[in-house]
Amino acid sequence: MENQKNNYCVIMAGGVGARFWPMSTTARPKQFIDVLGTGKTLIQLTFERFKNICPSENVYVVTNEIYKELVLAQLPELNENQVLCEPSRRNTAPCIAYANYKIREVNPDATIVVAPSDHIILKEDEFVSDIRTAMKAASENDWLLTLGIRPSRPDTGYGYIQYKEEKIYSGDDRLREVKTFTEKPSLEIAKSFLESRDFLWNSGIFIWSLKSIMKAFDNHLDEVSKLFEKGVGKYNTPGEEQFIKDTYAVCKNISIDYGIMEKADNVYVLAVDFGWSDLGTWGSLYTIRQKDENANAIVGANVMTYNTRNCIVNVPPDKLVVLQGLDDYIVVEENNTLLVCRKEDEQQIRQFVADVKMEKGTEFI
């Protein structure tokens, strides 16, 4: 195996997973739940995947400070210094800047993969091979790399990446230069993207050398990099926590996609196919769960169905549930809450959560 000491991984685990309510709550978001019934939570699966790519001491988890103990409990191999605690949610660019400066203190020659904590990867071996290809390319070139997924449907929930035809990397001809980034298009535009065949879904997994991403921050988000630059000498010391609290209080809320990837002229994409799902919604979980003869994906030991099909059902094992006449519904009971919602309307779940918070308080979310 190639020398991995310069390989680093940053796992982003700060989200609250509102679209997976009521299974996912503020106290225990989906990344800390065994969503697939494998005996391991999503963040544990993510961590194990990346241990094949870099040493466990080179893995950092960025999360909200309220989840610090959850992270350390679920990933006992990490020490406290590997858990980067955000005092507030500021999207992906600040959390990546924070990790950059922390890693630079220990290894300025790092090559970094940044990934969410709640993705599903069905073909683990291919994933590891693709990440290694991307890390090698990123370590040799001043490139900002992302992994692109061949789209299977005109989904309006993903960002799209259009790539250029020319093959530019001798190590792998799936690696192409990016022409455009488009955030969550309309259905009509998504259909046209699918037909043109030179678009990929943006997986939200990024690979770059530390030098390249820090240069990109200086060029495109210098107001963010200047804030974190002030902490040099405090990272990995007792002064880090207070510095981060002060910095996040004044840092802008911006994603790495908007802040850098859409502006930079050295962005590249590796087209991959390793059985990816971002597990963003109940519908995406439905597609990967096993179904019965009526295309129902059921978790729950005592569920009886009559004339019911195409549903995703997630209920406690001791609960008897009888469903009759449902087609294409989400039925979830968790945390003293029952949700019944049409699959096609699942984007409204965020609104349900906001309304519950307003009318019933935070007890149920």
Image: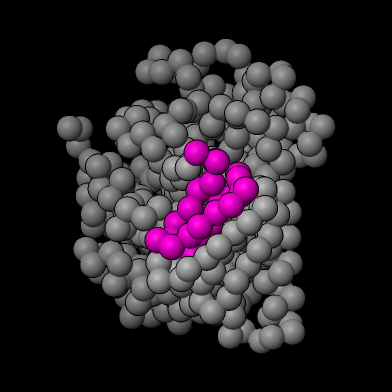
**What is the number of callouts on the image?**
0
Classify residue 131 as left or right of residue 231: left
Query: Residue at 46% across / 71% down in the picture?
Result: 319
Query: Residue at 40% across / 61% down in the picture?
Result: 301
Q: Where is the N terminus found, in terms of image quarters? A: top left
Q: Where is the C terminus found, in terms of image quarters? A: bottom right
* Numbered range of the magenta stretch: 293-315
Determine if the magenta segment contains residue 302.
Answer: yes
Determine if the magenta segment contains residue 306.
Answer: yes
Q: Is residue 291 above or below residue 126?
A: below
| Location of residue 198 in the rendering, given as x and y in whole percent from the top left corner | 65, 20
Q: Quadrant of residue 4?
A: top left
Query: Residue at 25% across / 42% down in the picture?
Result: 52
**Residue 124 seen from this side:** yes
Q: Is residue 303 above or below residue 207?
A: below
| Location of residue 282 in the rendering, given as x and y in whole percent from the top left corner | 58, 53
Q: Is residue 284 above or below residue 161?
A: below
| Location of residue 263 in the rendering, given as x and y in whole percent from the top left corner | 67, 40
Camera-nearest residue between 149 and 361: 361
Camera-nearest residue between 97 and 229: 97
Q: How is the image coloured?
A: one colour
Camera-nearest residue between 119 and 116: 119
| Location of residue 197 in the rendering, given as x and y in whole percent from the top left corner | 66, 18
